[in-house]
């Protein structure tokens, strides 16, 4: 029998298909029902990264996929394990990240109402499909290769999304013939000349244009800057688009989706070009967004094109190709006088937004200042893996000056907690030459702090900054603003540096911006993770931290119960 039609186990079909598609690493935890899969992955030379929880595996894969743009793979066992990973896959789905989840499922002949089998979920694939909308339960060993080829074909075409493959556990060790089915990615649509011409005509007379740029435009940073210059348009970024252009770019307004000033500047615009962005409320908080009548929208997803805005000029196409074509056309039709007028209008808003960002991010100015010092001196790309926490969305998102090519990995869509550390681990493993800094709050950090052990084992050299305000600070503030008495939000946290040291990582507490910048640089020389703990100066911290006293064993501050 030829290699193309091999009589091998379902697990072997899976490992062979993944290897043939260029998958060199998987994230996951072995279990009773997936042992043959892990044996075959190892036999194919595929690296296995072992997290301490399946949610961590999903976030690691997500971080790696965001920085590489390539499909990453998570392998779990049945039942609780695959459901543990589902929260992370929800985050990948909402942020359009290509993560492939693979697990065993109940046997082919399993009773429909169940019989108490270990890890039993009666319709596991349906549960995953309800979240991802893309699941494939195979029915023979040989179908595994087909499922891999079909999943990767979808994940590498158009808008990227996660997918799920379920292999009934009785098929994992069963043998059967099968062929490799190479994935086929369809080319992105090209911009239609008539659509470009119509959009350029609408923009040619604009006096107050803006560009709104999402992560779907990441490959078009230079092109976005050129379009901005020919229009004289300000550039507003989504959180995950930071690093698409240089934050010091002359027309940049920044990732200002959280600022109260955003509706004002949008309401004053007479035209918007939206490139590779969902225009989603999770990225741009004011609802509804006050958008002008003229909206040129460039997006690969024709369905997404119709969401969150009434688009006057749709351009279904690749962001880079369409931006180039639109810029070329505007060079021919745009008046330099109108461009000068637009720039003059923009400069006034830049001052307003800078002041707003400074005010709203004041509590995290030392964090951003140290991060900026560190980034300025970095010779490699800097990747910030953020969590859904105030220090990240009010602070770093607007206060960190990312260079073109740096990355801000932010869990925007689902807003999950505990994303930062494992996403940073995955990013560092995928791009070893990058400088990786994860940032979490003290509450969210506890969701996945166990992954410090995984980072130690894998010798991942990165920093984890924990910004402590005594609990769930944002929720505490929302309670107070409602007139409620805060309840359930103040947390008695651990000695974070000591906890890190107990797992083999470095741990330290810092007090100043200068200490933080130094600690970030020193962390690069340590063969493993460095946890850096700091407290923030905010109204939540003042309320929830209360009186502090030094620990007997370190310079860590300890909360009184």
Image: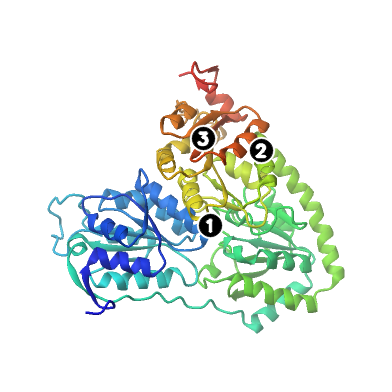
- Cα distance between the residues tagged 3 and 2: 15 Å
**Residue that label 3 marks:** 531
**Label of residue 370 in the image:** 2
SS label for mark 2: helix
In this rendering, the answer to whether 333 lies above or below 272 is below
In this rendering, the answer to whether 42 lies above or below 457 is below
Of pointers 1 and 2, the one earlier in the residue sequence = 1
At a point 55% along the width and 54% down the height, the residue shown is 281
- Cα distance between the residues tagged 1 and 3: 22 Å
In percent of width and height, residue 367 lies at: 63, 37
| Horizontal side of residue 267 vs 141, given as left or right | right
SS label for mark 3: strand
Of pointers 1 and 3, the one earlier in the residue sequence = 1
| Horizontal side of residue 243 vs 226, given as left or right | left
**Residue that label 1 marks:** 67
Of pointers 3 and 2, the one earlier in the residue sequence = 2
Indicate the quadrant where residue 53 lies.
top left
**Label of residue 472 in the image:** none
- Cα distance between the residues tagged 1 and 2: 23 Å
In this rendering, the answer to whether 127 lies above or below 393 is below
Specify the color scheme.
Answer: rainbow
Give whichever of 288, 525 is nearer the camera: 525
In percent of width and height, residue 125 lies at: 28, 61
In percent of width and height, residue 185 lies at: 46, 75
| Horizontal side of residue 153 vs 285, given as left or right | left
Q: Quadrant of the N terminus?
A: bottom left
Dot 2 surroundings within 10 Å: few (below 14), some, or many (20 or more)? many
Dot 3 surroundings within 10 Å: few (below 14), some, or many (20 or more)? many
Q: Quadrant of the C terminus?
A: top left
């Amino acid at each position: 029998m030829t290699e193309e039609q091999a009589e091998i186990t379902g697990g072997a079909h899976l490992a062979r298909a993944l290897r043939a598609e260029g998958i060199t690493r998987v994230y996951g935890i072995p279990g009773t029902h997936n042992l043959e899969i892990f044996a075959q992955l190892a036999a194919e030379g595929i690296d296995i990264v072992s997290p301490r929880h399946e949610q961590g595996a999903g976030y690691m894969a997500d971080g790696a996929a965001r920085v590489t743009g390539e499909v990453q793979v998570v392998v779990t066992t049945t039942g609780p394990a695959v459901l543990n990973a589902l929260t992370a896959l929800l985050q990948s789905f909402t942020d359009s990240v290509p993560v492939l989840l693979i697990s065993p499922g109940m046997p082919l002949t399993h009773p429909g109402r169940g019989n108490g089998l270990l890890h039993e979920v009666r319709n596991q694939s349906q549960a995953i499909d309800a979240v991802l909308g893309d699941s494939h339960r195979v029915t023979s060993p040989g179908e595994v290769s087909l499922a891999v080829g079909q999943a990767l074909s979808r994940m590498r075409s158009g808008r990227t999304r996660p997918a799920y493959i379920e292999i009934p556990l009785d098929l994992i060790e069963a043998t059967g013939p099968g062929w490799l089915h190479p994935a086929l990615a369809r080319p992105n649509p090209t911009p239609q000349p008539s659509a470009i011409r119509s959009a350029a005509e609408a923009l040619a007379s604009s006096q107050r244009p803006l560009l709104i740029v999402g992560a779907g435009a990441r490959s078009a940073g230079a092109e976005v800057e050129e379009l901005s210059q020919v229009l004289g348009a300000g550039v507003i970024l989504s959180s995950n688009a930071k690093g698409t252009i240089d934050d010091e770019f002359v027309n940049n307004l920044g990732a200002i989706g959280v600022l109260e000033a955003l509706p004002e500047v949008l309401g004053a615009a007479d035209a918007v070009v939206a490139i590779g962005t969902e225009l989603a409320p999770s990225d741009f908080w004011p609802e509804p967004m006050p958008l002008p009548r003229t909206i040129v929208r460039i997006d690969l997803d024709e369905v997404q094109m119709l969401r969150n805005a009434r688009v006057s000029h749709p351009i279904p196409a690749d962001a880079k190709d369409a931006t180039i074509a639109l810029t070329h056309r505007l060079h021919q039709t745009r008046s330099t006088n109108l461009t000068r007028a637009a720039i003059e209008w923009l400069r006034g808003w830049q001052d307003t937004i800078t002041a707003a960002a400074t005010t709203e991010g004041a509590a995290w100015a030392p964090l951003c200042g140290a991060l900026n010092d560190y980034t300025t001196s970095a010779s490699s790309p800097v990747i910030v893996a953020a969590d859904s926490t105030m220090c990240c969305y009010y602070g770093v998102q607007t206060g960190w000056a990312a260079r073109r090519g740096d990355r801000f990995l932010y869990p925007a869509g689902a807003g999950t907690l505990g994303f930062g550390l494992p996403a940073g681990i995955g990013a560092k493993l995928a791009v070893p030459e990058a400088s990786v800094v994860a940032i979490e709050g003290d509450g969210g950090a506890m969701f996945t702090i166990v992954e410090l052990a995984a980072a130690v084992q894998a010798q991942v050299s990165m920093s984890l900054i924990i910004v402590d305000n005594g609990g769930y600070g944002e929720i505490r503030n929302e309670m107070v603003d409602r007139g409620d008495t805060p309840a359930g939000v103040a947390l008695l946290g651990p000695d974070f540096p000591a906890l890190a040291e107990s797992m083999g990582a470095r741990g330290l507490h810092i007090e100043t911006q200068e200490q933080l910048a130094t600690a970030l640089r020193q962390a690069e020389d340590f063969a493993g993770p460095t946890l850096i703990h700091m407290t923030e100066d905010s109204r939540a911290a003042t309320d929830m931290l209360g009186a502090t006293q030094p620990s007997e064993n370190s310079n860590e501050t300890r909360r009184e119960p």
